[in-house]
Amino acid sequence: MIFHLGLFLGFQLLGEVIARVFTLRLPGPVIGMVLLAALLLARPTIGKKIEGTATTVLSYLSLLYVPAGVGIVQYLDQVSEIGLPLATALVGSTILAIGAGSLTFKYVGRAMGQADETPQ
């Protein structure tokens, strides 16, 4: 498990290094995630090996939202000033993300030859 966590953090570090060396506007962790996804596509056996660790990390993902909640409480006066535009952006981006995810899921299913099970 330690090796797998090191692998995740190593790809994040590699992404940070690439982002800073080439002064990219894309965040380093996103670059690292893309590189890790490329590795997993190239070597699917690695995905099977790290699946348990990834599942464990994802089960505790909600803990990462605690600092964000504290930040909102700390700047509550500023949030109250921009609350409506912020809420609109959050709801709109959530709807767009769900739509993009479902369309991607549907497209990948068709590309893999699976029947569309959407109720008519």
Image (cartoon, rainbow, N blue to C red):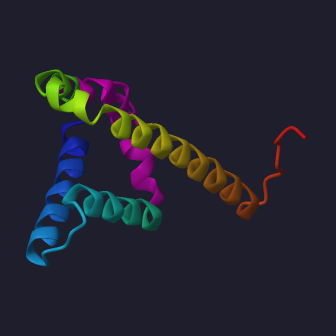
Left or right placement of residue 117 versus residue 103 in this view? right
Residue 3 in percent (x, y) is at 20, 44
Report the residue at 45% width, 46% height from top.
Answer: 48
Query: Whole-percent x and y of residue 8?
Result: 24, 49
Which sits in the foreground, 75 or 69?
Answer: 75
Q: Is residue 70 above or below residue 105?
A: above
Q: Closer to the camera, 9 or 17?
A: 17
Residue that protrudes farthest toward the bottom in the picture: 22
Q: Which residues are magenta?
A: 44-67
Query: Is residue 49 highlighted in magenta?
Result: yes
Q: Residue 54: horizontal and vertical position, in percent?
A: 36, 38
- The chief SS type of the magenta part is helix
Q: Is residue 82 above or below residue 101?
A: above
| Residue at (10, 70) in percent of width and height | 20
State the image quarter where residue 110 is shown: bottom right
Would you say 72 lies left or right of 54 here?
A: left
What x and y, as percent, mark residue 5? 22, 42
Whether residue 49 sits left or right of residue 22 in the image: it is: right
Asked if 78 appears above or below 94 in the picture, the reply is above
Quarter holding the N terminus is top left
Q: Is residue 120 left or right of residue 59?
A: right
The number of numbered badges drawn on the structure is: 0
The image quarter containing residue 80 is: top left
The quadrant holding residue 56 is: top left
Residue at horizontal 64 percent and vertical 51 percent from the top: 105
Q: Is residue 21 above or below residue 43?
A: below
At 57% from the left and 53% from the top, the residue drawn is 100
Q: Residue furthest front?
A: 81
Magenta span has 72?
no
Quadrant containing the C terminus is: top right
